Amino acid sequence: MAIATQHLRTLLINPFQVKVKRVQALLPSLATRYPPLALLLGGLAALPGYGFLFLFPVLALVLAWSLPMLIYQTGSLADWTILVLSTCILLLCGGISWVIIRTPVRAPAGLELDHTMAPALFKLISELEAAYGRPVVDRIILRSRFEVQISRTPKYGMPFLTSNTLEIGLPVLLSLPPDHFKALLARRIGQIGSRHNSVSGWLYQLRSIWQQYQSSYAQQKTLPGRFLHAFFRLYTPFYLQASVFAARLDELEADRYALDVINDRDMARVISQEIVARDFLYSRYWPKLKQLMQRGADARYQAYGQMSAVIHKGINKEFVQQSLIRALQAPQQAGNPVPTLGRRLENMGFNKPGTPQVLTQSAARSYLEPRSLQLITQEFDQRWLQQQQRRIRRRSAP
């Protein structure tokens, strides 16, 4: 029996799996050559998410509208059966719809900035919003990761009315010059701005929205909440894979959006500087800090307070060359929405990276109020130390 089953699998299933793998291998090149294909894949993958969220409210409304007619026409046993089933489905759909509407989708968390803490940053954002069009940035938060991102958070449970959160990594502010940070910020505001808003931008933002749904429903203990979480736990990874080609397309478009505030040659330098700074932090800076932490030197070292100074002294020409060579030789990772360095440069008409500039004035000093910058770096330093101490205690625990 086992031999027969294995033989049947070889005849029927294995050829199908081989064809699927061939299609998966061809998709990256096809989506790169034909952008409409990338948008089509992302658009088709977005439909189940919208369909699932709207299925239950629509069914509840339809059944609520037709239920009086069913009651009026009830006579036979079959009619009563239909009425009971319709009522049960109405209650089920109504309950799930109530959970969808009443469950707040959790916005990204971080240290929230107000106007008094960063007046220059708020002014810059207003200028970029005027240049790229609305919608506006509703809140700004600082995070510990090396990123500049805008996340849309749905209101009232539906992915239409949203609030926009600008997530800025404090390491970005501390490791990049002001004009380079401005270019990165222009990329993101251009992605959500009405003057450049496109299908690829919509598909790109859905990546964050579906993840926020998954995170929010994970906290639900009710049966409808668990049902919703089960769906998004399966659906979100599928959408992230299916939309990755559209996301890369939107990232390439975002590089062009930044050309409204910076010329193309300087933008090529911005891309290189971002890659080199991130590489330095993750390959040298943070590992060195952890070594100091294990030696008990944490009290004498400020992870964020001295970041700009270390980057100014630590990134030399040799490291820049090695970092850019590694970036140029690195293959495109399957699930990474950011295109390779070579693809981004090619999209802008260049065949080699720009030369990063030496960090003399950080964006943090230009866009954050001095006293606020000091307090912010102190708070991030303290958080980092506490996090590392907890990790050390866990490792040393028996």
Image (cartoon, rainbow, N blue to C red):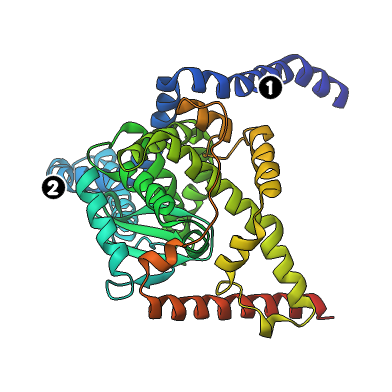
Along the line of sight, the residue nearer the viewer: 225 or 77: 225
* Amino acid type assigned to the residue bearing label 1 in the image: Gln
Left or right, residue 128 beside residue 237: left
Along the line of sight, the residue nearer the viewer: 266 or 329: 266
* Amino acid type assigned to the residue bearing label 2 in the image: Pro
Nearer the camera: disc 1 or disc 2: 1
Q: Where is residue 326 in the image (x, y as percent from the top left)?
A: 69, 39
Q: Is residue 202 visible?
A: no
Furthest residue toward right: 3
Q: Do the residues labelled 1 and 2 touch (CB within 8 Å)?
A: no
Badge 1 marks a residue whose secondary structure is: helix
Along the line of sight, the residue nearer the viewer: 336 or 95: 336
Residue underneath mark 1:
17
**Mark before the other along the chain sequence, 1 or 2:** 1
Relative to 52, residue 304 above or below = below
Q: What residue do we see at 26% from left, 50% from top?
A: 128
Quadrant the N terminus occupies? top right
